[in-house]
Image (cartoon, helix red, strand yellow):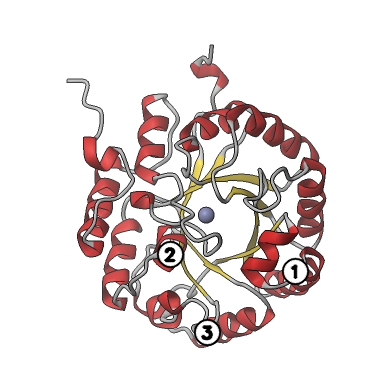
């Protein structure tokens, strides 16, 4: 049985809702509403916040206002701002913005790059082979690092591909090693369509931590089949101390259509706090932010804690 001493005292959480979440909404959220929601999230105690993406606006019109959002948000210095970079063109645009951004802090501190571990998912998502994606990212990562940006790489379909089924762990780790060698300081392993189970996650994370040395290993689970938090527990037990999640359980993936949300940050935080694992996040403030996004979107969300409220013991 899992004892408190088996668990880390604290973990790091990156809130990805403003990017992974907002990009998957059918409607475009007004920029001012995004900024208001991001500013709320930035005051929950979360220390890492993925704010937007530099994808082509004709591909993802939901995030076409990346520059406006970054110019308007008011995020405390101690909250790391990350942005998603799809390719070299995206990096060019992001670096140009970084140069002309006024104010006391940089427009962003970290970049995220991504590819899929499986050929079919990568082809459908970015129209490249995995090797072509890797070569592209091997050009992006050193340039971002030279600009003083922390680099994270997300490997989607790390635990299974909706088109190809099983994805070999050895292949996923080989991709991760190439990304780490190119300058990624953090690798997130994504269960993009919720195919992973806890036993698989425990074994994979333990191997990844052993093989990736000084690179931070992050778990990125989707709750497509309701197994997100069970997978978190397995990852924690294997030694993972870094997670990505989305307020309101927003999010998904452009392919396949119907892929559902990331684990809800408020469900993750509730479970961790109840187990004595610190996150630095104030759950009540986080729930207030999730309640706001529910109002903005005008629909019910997948998050459980948003419906039930926090656990009250007295
Ligand atoms: Zn995701």
**Front one among 133 and 129:** 129
Q: Measured along the vertical axis of the image, is residue 22 above or below residue 161?
A: below
Name the residue tied to disc 2: 24
- In this rendering, the label closer to the viewer, 1 or 2: 2
Element class at badge 1: helix
| Residue drawn at x 31%, y 55% as measured from the top left | 43
Element class at badge 3: helix
- In this rendering, the label closer to the viewer, 2 or 3: 2
Q: Quadrant of residue 76?
A: bottom left
Name the residue tied to disc 1: 133
Name the residue tied to disc 3: 97
| Residue drawn at x 31%, y 71% as measured from the top left | 35
Percent across and percent down for residue 136 are 76, 73
Percent across and percent down for residue 240 are 61, 36
Q: Earlier in the sequence, mark 1 or mark 2?
A: 2
**Real-space Cα distance between discs 1 and 3?**
24 Å
Other-residue count near label 3 (Cα within 10 Å), few / some / many at <14 / 14–19 / ≥20: some
Percent across and percent down for residue 183 are 75, 62
């Amino acid at each position: 049985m899992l004892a408190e001493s088996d668990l880390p005292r604290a973990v790091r959480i990156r809130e990805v809702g403003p990017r992974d979440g907002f990009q998957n909404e059918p409607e475009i959220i007004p920029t001012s509403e995004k900024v208001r929601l991001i500013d709320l999230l930035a005051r929950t105690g979360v220390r890492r916040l993925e704010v937007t993406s530099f994808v082509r606006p004709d591909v993802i019109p939901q995030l076409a206002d990346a520059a406006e959002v970054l110019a308007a948000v008011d995020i405390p210095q101690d909250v790391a701002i990350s942005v998603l970079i799809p390719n070299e063109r995206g990096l060019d645009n992001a670096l140009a913005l970084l140069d002309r951004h006024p104010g006391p802090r940089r427009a962003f501190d970290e970049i995220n790059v991504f590819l899929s571990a499986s050929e079919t998912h990568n082809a459908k998502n970015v129209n490249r082979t995995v090797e072509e994606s890797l070569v592209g990212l091997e050009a992006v990562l050193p340039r971002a690092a030279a600009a003083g940006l922390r680099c994270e790489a997300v490997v989607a379909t790390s635990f299974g591909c909706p088109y190809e089924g099983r994805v070999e762990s050895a292949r996923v780790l080989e991709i991760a090693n190439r990304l780490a060698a190119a300058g990624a300081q953090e690798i997130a392993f994504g269960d993009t369509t919720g195919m992973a189970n806890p036993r698989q996650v425990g074994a994979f994370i333990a191997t990844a931590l052993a093989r990736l040395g000084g690179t931070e290993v992050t778990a990125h689970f989707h709750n497509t089949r309701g197994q997100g938090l069970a997978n978190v527990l397995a990852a924690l037990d294997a030694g993972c101390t870094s997670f990505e999640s989305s307020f309101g359980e927003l999010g998904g993936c452009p392919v396949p259509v119907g892929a559902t949300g990331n684990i809800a940050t408020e469900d993750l935080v509730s479970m961790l706090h109840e187990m004595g694992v610190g996150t630095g996040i104030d759950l009540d403030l986080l729930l207030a932010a999730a309640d706001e996004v529910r109002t903005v979107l005008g629909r019910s969300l997948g998050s459980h804690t948003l419906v039930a409220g926090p656990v009250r013991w007295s």
